[in-house]
Image (cartoon, rainbow, N blue to C red):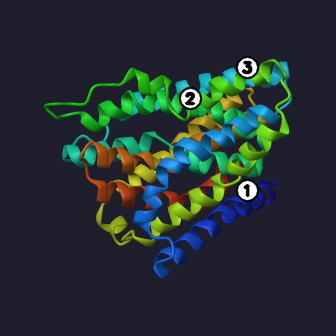
Amino acid sequence: MFFQNMLIAAEQVAILYIMAAIGVIADKAGVFIESTARKCTDLLFTVITPAKILQSFFTLEYSISALKGLFISIGGGILMHLVVGAVMVPLFNKNAPEKTSVYKFAAMFGNCGYMGLPLVDAVVGKEGVFYMSAIIISFQIFNFTYGVWVMNKGRENGAKIDIKKIIINPGVLPVFVGLPVFMLSIKVPGIILTPVSAISGMNSPLAMLMFGTYISNTDFRTVFRDKKIPFVALFKLILMPLAMLAALKLFGIGGALGTTLLIASATPSANNTIMFAAKYERDTSLASQTVAIVSLLSIITLPIMIALY
């Protein structure tokens, strides 16, 4: 049964990475290069991913268990980030600040949006997207608080935490819009649902094509030179999901909700590692290499973790 489950999960992960491979080929051919992909980040983050979240709220039938699961997802996401944030404090501190920030951020924050949403959609379905949307709220809260603090630690003029961005951002706003629709069982007319669904369908292909261009421009020989990247991968891809797995078993959380929480903890380092490194003048080359290498290793670890659960 374990190997059967692993093969099922591996197939879904493989589908996503085949799209990424096409992105690699497109980059090498000059059809869709990394600089173009980076310009698509805002489109994916502000339009397509919110549409995916809205679609899950618009199409999932209301039930008490689903609503309960939504709040458990938010709580689970907040607890996960709190615990990992506390663990991160003493780690990687013997490196230069511009590298320490990248290691800590990459080890803590998972790719819940670009990787998590497509994967739970494939493995669990729209119910998984619904729960992952709640986890993204906790991700955004810690991203714009702890994440900003990590990236600015050790600098004389650290950036201030923007409370507005914690509340008003593309990961949280669609939940605020979709939640009343879900709770009141409002039937969304086709003239709205159809374009939202069509746009949301771009989420997985575009995210993985973009990721493929990042892989195409990564020097993987650095994984053998930088001993910290494998440690980031160990923490993010193995230790975090194993801890989540133990917590899920301890509290008896199963089904689509448990699978979603497990996948959220097992996703590779967030693409925001690169964007935040660039914004706060940290080591962007190291950030790109770390995200690409950890993401490639997740091809092996994600199916194993899902099968273990």
The answer to whether marks 3 and 1 mark residues whose Cβ atoms lie closer than 8 Å is no
Q: Which residue of the protein is positioned furthest toward the bottom in this rendering? A: 29
Foreground: disc 3 or disc 1: 3
Which residue position holds label 3? 180
Q: What kind of residue is marked 2?
A: Ile
Residue 83 place in picture, x, y as percent: 47, 27
Q: Secondary structure at mark 1?
A: helix
Which residue is at 52% across, 66% downward? 212
Question: Against 239, is 41 above or below?
Answer: below
> 148 or 251: nearer the eye?
148
The reply, left or right, for residue 186 in relation to residue 56 is right
Q: What kind of residue is marked 3?
A: Pro
Q: Is residue 173 visible?
A: yes
Which residue position holds label 1? 9
Which residue is at 35% across, 54% downward? 287
Residue 132 place in picture, x, y as percent: 65, 36
Foreground: disc 2 or disc 1: 2
Mark 2 or mark 3: which comes first in sequence?
A: 2
Residue 309 place in picture, x, y as percent: 71, 43
Q: What kind of residue is marked 1?
A: Ala
Which residue is at 32% across, 39% downward? 91
> 248 or 273: nearer the eye?
273
Q: CA distance from mark 2 to mark 3?
A: 16 Å
